[in-house]
Image (tube, rainbow, N blue to C red):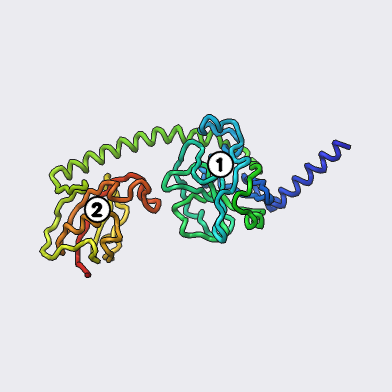
Amino acid sequence: MKNIFKIVVIVLSSISFAVAQNKSEEGIFAEFNTTKGKIVVLLEYKKTPITVSNFISLAEGNNIQVSEKLKGKPYYNGLKFHRVIADFMIQGGCPKGDGTGDPGYKFDDEFVADLKHSEKGILSMANAGPATNGSQFFITHRATPHLDGKHTVFGHVVSGIEVVDKIAKDDVITSVKIIRVGKEAKKFNAQKTFSDYFLNKAAADKLKAEKLKEAKEKAIAEFANAGTTASGLKYIVLQEGTGNKPVASSNVKVHYTGMFLDGKVFDSSVQRGETIDFGLNQVIKGWTEGVQLMPEGSKYKFYIPSNLAYGERGAGGVIPPNTDLIFEIELIKINQ
Protein backbone atom coordinates (compact mmCIF):
# COMPACT_ATOMS: atom_id res chain seq x y z
CA MET A 1 0.00 0.00 0.00
CA LYS A 2 2.87 2.37 0.87
CA ASN A 3 4.51 1.71 -2.50
CA ILE A 4 1.25 2.43 -4.33
CA PHE A 5 0.93 5.72 -2.42
CA LYS A 6 4.51 6.70 -3.34
CA ILE A 7 3.84 5.93 -7.00
CA VAL A 8 0.66 8.04 -6.96
CA VAL A 9 2.56 10.97 -5.40
CA ILE A 10 5.34 10.70 -7.98
CA VAL A 11 2.85 10.52 -10.86
CA LEU A 12 0.87 13.50 -9.57
CA SER A 13 4.07 15.52 -9.13
CA SER A 14 5.19 14.63 -12.65
CA ILE A 15 1.83 15.60 -14.11
CA SER A 16 1.85 18.87 -12.20
CA PHE A 17 5.28 19.80 -13.49
CA ALA A 18 4.46 18.65 -17.01
CA VAL A 19 1.59 21.12 -17.02
CA ALA A 20 3.87 23.83 -15.64
CA GLN A 21 6.40 23.38 -18.43
CA ASN A 22 3.85 22.90 -21.21
CA LYS A 23 4.58 19.18 -21.33
CA SER A 24 7.32 19.03 -23.95
CA GLU A 25 9.43 22.09 -23.18
CA GLU A 26 13.04 21.34 -22.31
CA GLY A 27 15.23 23.53 -20.19
CA ILE A 28 16.12 24.36 -16.62
CA PHE A 29 13.27 25.41 -14.35
CA ALA A 30 13.20 26.97 -10.90
CA GLU A 31 10.22 25.96 -8.80
CA PHE A 32 9.56 28.54 -6.08
CA ASN A 33 7.48 27.12 -3.27
CA THR A 34 6.04 30.04 -1.31
CA THR A 35 3.51 30.60 1.42
CA LYS A 36 1.09 31.73 -1.30
CA GLY A 37 1.68 28.85 -3.71
CA LYS A 38 4.04 27.64 -6.42
CA ILE A 39 5.76 29.70 -9.12
CA VAL A 40 7.68 27.96 -11.92
CA VAL A 41 10.26 29.93 -13.91
CA LEU A 42 12.17 28.94 -17.04
CA LEU A 43 15.83 29.96 -16.62
CA GLU A 44 17.80 31.33 -19.60
CA TYR A 45 20.91 29.25 -18.93
CA LYS A 46 22.13 29.42 -22.54
CA LYS A 47 21.85 33.19 -22.88
CA THR A 48 22.81 34.23 -19.34
CA PRO A 49 24.93 31.32 -18.06
CA ILE A 50 26.71 33.28 -15.33
CA THR A 51 23.56 34.74 -13.81
CA VAL A 52 21.70 31.43 -13.99
CA SER A 53 24.63 29.45 -12.59
CA ASN A 54 24.79 31.90 -9.69
CA PHE A 55 21.09 31.42 -8.98
CA ILE A 56 21.17 27.62 -9.30
CA SER A 57 24.29 27.14 -7.19
CA LEU A 58 22.79 29.33 -4.48
CA ALA A 59 19.46 27.50 -4.60
CA GLU A 60 21.12 24.08 -4.43
CA GLY A 61 23.58 25.09 -1.73
CA ASN A 62 26.80 24.31 -3.61
CA ASN A 63 28.00 27.84 -4.37
CA ILE A 64 31.57 28.04 -3.08
CA GLN A 65 31.82 31.84 -3.37
CA VAL A 66 29.34 32.54 -0.56
CA SER A 67 30.47 33.68 2.87
CA GLU A 68 31.40 30.85 5.25
CA LYS A 69 28.22 30.94 7.31
CA LEU A 70 26.12 30.39 4.17
CA LYS A 71 28.09 27.52 2.63
CA GLY A 72 26.43 24.15 2.12
CA LYS A 73 22.91 25.49 2.64
CA PRO A 74 20.07 26.01 0.14
CA TYR A 75 20.42 29.79 0.14
CA TYR A 76 16.89 30.87 -0.70
CA ASN A 77 14.98 28.55 1.61
CA GLY A 78 13.19 30.59 4.26
CA LEU A 79 13.96 34.02 2.78
CA LYS A 80 11.23 36.63 2.38
CA PHE A 81 9.88 38.70 -0.44
CA HIS A 82 11.07 41.80 1.37
CA ARG A 83 9.94 44.35 -1.22
CA VAL A 84 6.62 44.29 -3.05
CA ILE A 85 5.33 47.20 -5.13
CA ALA A 86 1.84 46.92 -6.59
CA ASP A 87 1.70 46.88 -10.40
CA PHE A 88 5.51 46.82 -10.54
CA MET A 89 7.32 43.82 -9.05
CA ILE A 90 8.03 41.45 -6.15
CA GLN A 91 11.61 41.24 -4.85
CA GLY A 92 13.35 38.60 -2.76
CA GLY A 93 16.65 36.86 -2.16
CA CYS A 94 18.08 39.06 0.61
CA PRO A 95 19.55 37.08 3.54
CA LYS A 96 18.94 40.03 5.87
CA GLY A 97 15.35 40.45 4.75
CA ASP A 98 15.62 44.20 4.24
CA GLY A 99 17.31 44.60 0.86
CA THR A 100 20.81 45.28 2.21
CA GLY A 101 22.15 41.72 2.25
CA ASP A 102 24.22 39.75 -0.25
CA PRO A 103 25.91 36.35 -0.51
CA GLY A 104 29.37 37.75 0.17
CA TYR A 105 30.35 38.65 -3.40
CA LYS A 106 29.21 40.63 -6.43
CA PHE A 107 29.32 39.79 -10.11
CA ASP A 108 28.95 41.52 -13.47
CA ASP A 109 25.81 42.31 -15.43
CA GLU A 110 24.93 39.99 -18.31
CA PHE A 111 22.74 41.99 -20.66
CA VAL A 112 21.36 40.23 -23.74
CA ALA A 113 19.68 42.16 -26.56
CA ASP A 114 16.61 39.93 -26.84
CA LEU A 115 16.05 39.48 -23.10
CA LYS A 116 14.05 42.49 -21.99
CA HIS A 117 11.60 43.51 -19.29
CA SER A 118 8.92 43.20 -21.94
CA GLU A 119 6.03 41.62 -20.07
CA LYS A 120 4.58 40.38 -16.83
CA GLY A 121 6.48 37.55 -15.14
CA ILE A 122 10.04 38.51 -16.09
CA LEU A 123 12.71 37.25 -13.65
CA SER A 124 15.56 39.76 -13.29
CA MET A 125 18.46 40.60 -10.99
CA ALA A 126 18.12 43.38 -8.43
CA ASN A 127 21.26 45.47 -7.96
CA ALA A 128 22.68 48.69 -6.56
CA GLY A 129 24.26 49.80 -9.83
CA PRO A 130 26.53 48.32 -12.51
CA ALA A 131 28.28 45.02 -11.65
CA THR A 132 26.71 44.73 -8.18
CA ASN A 133 24.65 41.57 -8.67
CA GLY A 134 24.47 39.13 -5.77
CA SER A 135 21.47 37.04 -4.76
CA GLN A 136 18.51 39.41 -4.91
CA PHE A 137 16.02 39.08 -7.76
CA PHE A 138 12.62 40.38 -8.75
CA ILE A 139 9.64 39.23 -10.83
CA THR A 140 7.66 41.85 -12.73
CA HIS A 141 3.93 42.54 -12.55
CA ARG A 142 4.05 44.26 -15.94
CA ALA A 143 6.42 45.35 -18.70
CA THR A 144 9.15 47.61 -17.28
CA PRO A 145 11.27 48.68 -20.29
CA HIS A 146 13.00 51.42 -18.28
CA LEU A 147 14.93 48.63 -16.52
CA ASP A 148 16.45 47.28 -19.75
CA GLY A 149 20.23 47.62 -19.75
CA LYS A 150 20.23 48.16 -15.99
CA HIS A 151 19.09 44.79 -14.64
CA THR A 152 19.92 41.35 -16.04
CA VAL A 153 16.90 39.38 -17.26
CA PHE A 154 17.52 35.65 -16.73
CA GLY A 155 14.14 33.93 -16.87
CA HIS A 156 10.36 34.19 -17.08
CA VAL A 157 7.38 32.65 -15.31
CA VAL A 158 5.79 29.68 -17.12
CA SER A 159 3.38 28.69 -14.36
CA GLY A 160 1.97 30.37 -11.28
CA ILE A 161 1.69 33.94 -12.49
CA GLU A 162 -1.45 34.21 -10.36
CA VAL A 163 0.74 33.41 -7.34
CA VAL A 164 3.05 36.28 -8.27
CA ASP A 165 -0.01 38.53 -8.07
CA LYS A 166 -0.84 37.22 -4.59
CA ILE A 167 2.61 37.70 -3.07
CA ALA A 168 2.68 40.36 -0.35
CA LYS A 169 5.57 41.86 1.61
CA ASP A 170 7.20 39.33 3.97
CA ASP A 171 5.65 36.27 2.31
CA VAL A 172 8.21 33.46 2.53
CA ILE A 173 10.05 31.36 -0.04
CA THR A 174 9.88 27.98 1.69
CA SER A 175 12.12 26.34 -0.93
CA VAL A 176 13.50 26.65 -4.45
CA LYS A 177 13.81 23.43 -6.45
CA ILE A 178 15.86 23.31 -9.65
CA ILE A 179 14.48 20.93 -12.30
CA ARG A 180 16.48 20.01 -15.40
CA VAL A 181 14.61 18.66 -18.42
CA GLY A 182 16.53 17.36 -21.44
CA LYS A 183 20.12 16.31 -22.13
CA GLU A 184 21.58 19.79 -22.55
CA ALA A 185 19.93 21.06 -19.38
CA LYS A 186 21.26 18.12 -17.39
CA LYS A 187 24.78 18.74 -18.70
CA PHE A 188 24.81 22.34 -17.46
CA ASN A 189 27.11 22.42 -14.42
CA ALA A 190 26.12 25.54 -12.51
CA GLN A 191 28.73 25.24 -9.77
CA LYS A 192 31.61 24.84 -12.25
CA THR A 193 30.29 27.58 -14.55
CA PHE A 194 30.13 30.10 -11.73
CA SER A 195 33.44 29.04 -10.17
CA ASP A 196 35.17 29.31 -13.56
CA TYR A 197 33.69 32.77 -14.01
CA PHE A 198 35.32 33.95 -10.79
CA LEU A 199 38.67 32.42 -11.73
CA ASN A 200 38.58 34.18 -15.10
CA LYS A 201 37.22 37.35 -13.52
CA ALA A 202 40.20 37.63 -11.19
CA ALA A 203 42.59 37.60 -14.15
CA ALA A 204 40.38 39.94 -16.18
CA ASP A 205 40.03 42.37 -13.27
CA LYS A 206 43.80 42.44 -12.83
CA LEU A 207 44.33 43.20 -16.52
CA LYS A 208 41.57 45.82 -16.46
CA ALA A 209 43.12 47.49 -13.40
CA GLU A 210 46.53 47.60 -15.11
CA LYS A 211 45.04 49.16 -18.26
CA LEU A 212 43.08 51.66 -16.19
CA LYS A 213 46.22 52.62 -14.29
CA GLU A 214 48.09 53.17 -17.57
CA ALA A 215 45.20 55.21 -18.99
CA LYS A 216 45.00 57.33 -15.85
CA GLU A 217 48.75 57.98 -15.88
CA LYS A 218 48.53 59.00 -19.55
CA ALA A 219 45.57 61.31 -18.87
CA ILE A 220 47.31 62.87 -15.86
CA ALA A 221 50.39 63.47 -18.01
CA GLU A 222 48.25 65.18 -20.65
CA PHE A 223 46.76 67.45 -17.98
CA ALA A 224 50.07 68.03 -16.15
CA ASN A 225 50.22 71.69 -17.17
CA ALA A 226 46.46 72.20 -17.25
CA GLY A 227 44.51 74.66 -15.18
CA THR A 228 43.31 73.17 -11.90
CA THR A 229 40.54 74.45 -9.64
CA ALA A 230 40.35 74.08 -5.87
CA SER A 231 37.98 71.13 -6.26
CA GLY A 232 40.48 69.18 -8.38
CA LEU A 233 38.84 69.83 -11.75
CA LYS A 234 41.46 70.11 -14.52
CA TYR A 235 41.00 71.87 -17.85
CA ILE A 236 42.79 72.61 -21.10
CA VAL A 237 41.69 75.41 -23.42
CA LEU A 238 41.32 73.96 -26.92
CA GLN A 239 39.69 77.02 -28.46
CA GLU A 240 39.49 80.53 -27.07
CA GLY A 241 36.12 82.29 -26.87
CA THR A 242 35.29 85.98 -26.69
CA GLY A 243 31.77 85.97 -25.30
CA ASN A 244 30.37 86.18 -21.80
CA LYS A 245 30.80 83.50 -19.16
CA PRO A 246 27.73 81.77 -17.71
CA VAL A 247 26.84 81.62 -14.02
CA ALA A 248 25.59 78.66 -11.98
CA SER A 249 21.95 79.45 -12.78
CA SER A 250 22.49 79.91 -16.54
CA ASN A 251 20.86 77.83 -19.23
CA VAL A 252 23.37 77.02 -21.98
CA LYS A 253 23.69 75.42 -25.41
CA VAL A 254 26.71 73.14 -25.85
CA HIS A 255 28.29 70.40 -27.91
CA TYR A 256 30.17 67.74 -25.95
CA THR A 257 31.96 64.41 -26.12
CA GLY A 258 32.31 62.26 -23.00
CA MET A 259 35.16 59.75 -22.77
CA PHE A 260 36.65 57.27 -20.36
CA LEU A 261 40.34 57.72 -19.56
CA ASP A 262 41.31 55.26 -22.29
CA GLY A 263 39.66 57.52 -24.88
CA LYS A 264 36.58 55.37 -25.43
CA VAL A 265 33.56 57.59 -26.13
CA PHE A 266 30.47 56.82 -24.05
CA ASP A 267 28.30 59.74 -25.18
CA SER A 268 28.59 62.53 -27.72
CA SER A 269 26.25 65.24 -28.97
CA VAL A 270 28.80 65.84 -31.72
CA GLN A 271 28.36 62.30 -33.04
CA ARG A 272 24.58 62.68 -32.88
CA GLY A 273 24.79 66.01 -34.68
CA GLU A 274 22.56 67.71 -32.12
CA THR A 275 23.46 70.35 -29.57
CA ILE A 276 22.06 70.13 -26.05
CA ASP A 277 20.44 72.81 -23.88
CA PHE A 278 20.44 72.54 -20.08
CA GLY A 279 20.64 74.45 -16.84
CA LEU A 280 24.05 74.46 -15.18
CA ASN A 281 22.36 73.65 -11.87
CA GLN A 282 20.96 70.42 -13.35
CA VAL A 283 24.16 68.56 -14.25
CA ILE A 284 27.14 66.92 -12.53
CA LYS A 285 29.33 69.15 -10.36
CA GLY A 286 32.23 69.01 -12.80
CA TRP A 287 30.06 70.44 -15.56
CA THR A 288 28.50 73.09 -13.34
CA GLU A 289 31.92 74.32 -12.29
CA GLY A 290 33.73 73.80 -15.57
CA VAL A 291 31.30 75.46 -17.96
CA GLN A 292 31.30 78.59 -15.79
CA LEU A 293 35.00 78.98 -16.67
CA MET A 294 34.20 79.13 -20.39
CA PRO A 295 33.45 82.24 -22.48
CA GLU A 296 30.87 81.78 -25.24
CA GLY A 297 32.50 80.35 -28.36
CA SER A 298 35.23 78.50 -26.45
CA LYS A 299 36.04 74.80 -26.33
CA TYR A 300 37.62 73.19 -23.25
CA LYS A 301 38.81 69.72 -22.39
CA PHE A 302 38.11 68.68 -18.80
CA TYR A 303 39.47 65.97 -16.53
CA ILE A 304 36.62 65.39 -14.08
CA PRO A 305 37.41 63.31 -10.96
CA SER A 306 34.73 60.80 -10.02
CA ASN A 307 33.58 62.82 -7.00
CA LEU A 308 32.70 65.66 -9.39
CA ALA A 309 31.13 63.23 -11.89
CA TYR A 310 28.87 60.28 -10.99
CA GLY A 311 30.63 59.16 -7.82
CA GLU A 312 30.03 55.83 -6.13
CA ARG A 313 26.72 55.23 -7.91
CA GLY A 314 27.88 55.44 -11.51
CA ALA A 315 25.29 56.18 -14.20
CA GLY A 316 22.77 54.26 -16.27
CA GLY A 317 24.69 51.02 -16.58
CA VAL A 318 27.20 52.93 -18.74
CA ILE A 319 29.57 54.62 -16.28
CA PRO A 320 30.92 52.38 -13.50
CA PRO A 321 31.14 53.64 -9.92
CA ASN A 322 34.15 55.78 -8.96
CA THR A 323 35.12 56.56 -12.55
CA ASP A 324 37.11 59.64 -13.58
CA LEU A 325 35.96 61.07 -16.91
CA ILE A 326 37.19 63.25 -19.77
CA PHE A 327 34.83 65.73 -21.44
CA GLU A 328 35.39 68.00 -24.42
CA ILE A 329 32.81 70.79 -24.21
CA GLU A 330 32.11 73.61 -26.64
CA LEU A 331 30.02 76.46 -25.22
CA ILE A 332 27.97 77.67 -28.16
CA LYS A 333 25.57 80.03 -26.45
CA ILE A 334 24.25 81.25 -23.12
CA ASN A 335 20.49 81.00 -23.55
CA GLN A 336 19.62 82.96 -20.43
Left or right: where 285 falls relative to 298: right
Give residue 55's mark.
1
Q: Are marks 2 and 1 in contact (CB under 8 Å)?
A: no
Nearer to the camera, 120 or 246: 246
Point 15% across, 62% down: residue:
245
Asked if residue 186 lies left or right of residue 225, the reply is: right
Residue 134 is situated, as x and y percent measured from the top left of the image, at 49, 42
Residue bearing the label numbered 2: 327
**Closer-to-camera residue (273/335):** 335
**In terms of image quadrants, where is residue 69?**
top right
Q: Quadrant of the C terminus?
A: bottom left
**Which one is nearer the viewer's eye here, 192 or 329?**
329
Q: Position of residue 63 (x, y in %)?
A: 55, 34
Disc 2/disc 1 C-alpha distance (Å): 39 Å
Q: Is residue 148 visible?
A: yes
* Image coords of residue 329 (percent x, y): 22, 57
- Label 1 neighbour load within 10 Å: few <14, some 14-19, many 20+: many
Residue type at numbered disc 1? Phe
Residue under the image location 14 percent in, 48 percent down: 227
Q: Helix, strand or loop at disc 2?
A: strand
Identity of the residue furthest to the right in this view: 1
Q: Residue furthest bottom?
A: 336
Circle nearer the N terminus (2, 1)? 1
Judge by depth and name the residue closer to the eye, 293 or 4.
293
Residue drawn at point x = 29 percent, y = 52 percent:
265
* Number of marks present in the image shown: 2
Kind of residue at disc 2: Phe
Residue 195: image location, x then y, percent: 50, 33
